[in-house]
Image (cartoon, helix red, strand yellow):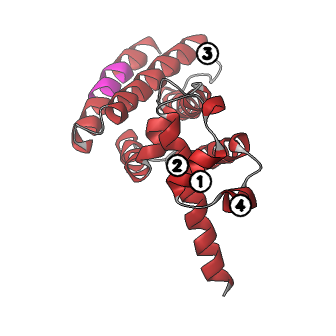
C-alpha cells in the first residue's frame, strides 16, 4: 500500500514542480502564489502545504533535485565520450522540458543555470586535463573549460528556448563540431 502512496506523492510533487516551472517562464518567483501553482497542478492548497512550506521551499527543493539528477548524470559520463555525455544530457532535457524552460527563462535568476554550467565545466576540465596530461589548476585550462562549458550551455539554452525546433542529432553534431575545434586548439597549446 505504501508504494501506491509513494507513486501518488511523487506524481503530485512532479505536478507542483512543473506548475511552478511553467509560471517561472513568465514571471519572477516572488510574484507567484501558492494558489496559482496549486491551480495549474490541479491540487488544492492543503495538498501543496503537505509537501512544501511555501513557494520558495518548492523552488529550493526543485533546484536541489535538478542539480542532484544532473550531477549524477555528469558523474556517470566522466569516463565516456562527449557525444555519449551529450546524448544523455539531451535525454534528460527532453524528459524535463518545463523545468529546462524555467532554468533558461529570462525571469529566472540564472543561479541554477550557473550551477549547472559549473558542473559541466568541471567535467569538461577533467576530460581535457586527463586527455592532455596537464595540471588541473592551469589558468589556460580554466579559461578553455569556461569557454567550452558556456558555449555548450548556450547551445542547449537556444535549443530549449526555441522549443526544441532542431533535432537532437543536429544539436549533438553541432556541439561535437565546436568541441573538435576547441580540442584541437587546446591540444596545440599543451
Q: Is 93 situated left or right of 54 in this image?
A: left
The answer for how far apart the CA atoms under marks 2 and 3 are is 43 Å
Query: Of the residues under marks 4 and 2, which one precedes in the sequence?
Result: 2
The answer for how far apart the CA atoms under marks 1 and 3 are is 49 Å
* Image point (36%, 20%), residue name: 182
The answer for how far apart the CA atoms under marks 1 and 2 are is 8 Å
Q: Is 176 situated left or right of 4 in this image?
A: left
For the residues carrying marks 1 and 3, which lies nearer the camera in this image? 1
Please tell me whether residue 134 is drawn above or below residue 119 in the rendered image.
above
Q: Which mark is residue 38?
A: 1
Q: Which mark is residue 138?
A: 3
Q: Nearer the viewer, residue 151 or 53?
A: 53
Please tell me whether residue 19 is drawn above or below residue 47 in the rendered image.
above
For the residues carrying marks 4 and 3, which lies nearer the camera in this image? 4
Query: Of the residues under marks 1 and 3, which one precedes in the sequence?
Result: 1
Dot 4: what SS?
A: helix
The answer for how far apart the CA atoms under marks 4 and 2 are is 16 Å
Q: Nearer the viewer, residue 116 or 6?
A: 6
Query: Can you give x and y, in whole percent of width and height, for residue 115 in the image?
Result: 61, 31
The quarter of the displayed image where residue 152 is located: top left
* Image point (62%, 22%), residue name: 135
Q: Residues within 10 Å of mark 1 (few under 14, many from 20)?
A: many
Query: Can you give x and y, in whole percent of width and height, for residue 38 in the image?
Result: 59, 53
Query: Of the residues under marks 4 and 3, which one precedes in the sequence?
Result: 4
Query: Of the residues under marks 2 and 3, which one precedes in the sequence?
Result: 2
Dot 2: what SS?
A: helix
The region drawn magenta spans 177-183
Dot 1: what SS?
A: helix
Q: Which mark is residue 46?
A: 4
Q: Which mark is residue 19?
A: 2
Amino acid at each position: 500500500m505504501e508504494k501506491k502512496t509513494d507513486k501518488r506523492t511523487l506524481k503530485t510533487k512532479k505536478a507542483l514542480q512543473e506548475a511552478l516551472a511553467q509560471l517561472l517562464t513568465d514571471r519572477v518567483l516572488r510574484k507567484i502564489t501558492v494558489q496559482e501553482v496549486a491551480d495549474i497542478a490541479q491540487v488544492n492548497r492543503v495538498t501543496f502545504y503537505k509537501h512544501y512550506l511555501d513557494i520558495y521551499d518548492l523552488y529550493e527543493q526543485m533546484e536541489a533535485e535538478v542539480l542532484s539528477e544532473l550531477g549524477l548524470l555528469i558523474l556517470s559520463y566522466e569516463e565516456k565520450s562527449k557525444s555519449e555525455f551529450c546524448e544523455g544530457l539531451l535525454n534528460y532535457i527532453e524528459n524535463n522540458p518545463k523545468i529546462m524552460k524555467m532554468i533558461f527563462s529570462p525571469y529566472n535568476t540564472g543561479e541554477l543555470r550557473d550551477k549547472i554550467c559549473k558542473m559541466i565545466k568541471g567535467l569538461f576540465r577533467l576530460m581535457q586535463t586527463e586527455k592532455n596530461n596537464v595540471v588541473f589548476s592551469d589558468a589556460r585550462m580554466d579559461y578553455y573549460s569556461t569557454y567550452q562549458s558556456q558555449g555548450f550551455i548556450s547551445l542547449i539554452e537556444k535549443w530549449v528556448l526555441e522549443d526544441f525546433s532542431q533535432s537532437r542529432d543536429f544539436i549533438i553534431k553541432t556541439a561535437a563540431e565546436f568541441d573538435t575545434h576547441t580540442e584541437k586548439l587546446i591540444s596545440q597549446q599543451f
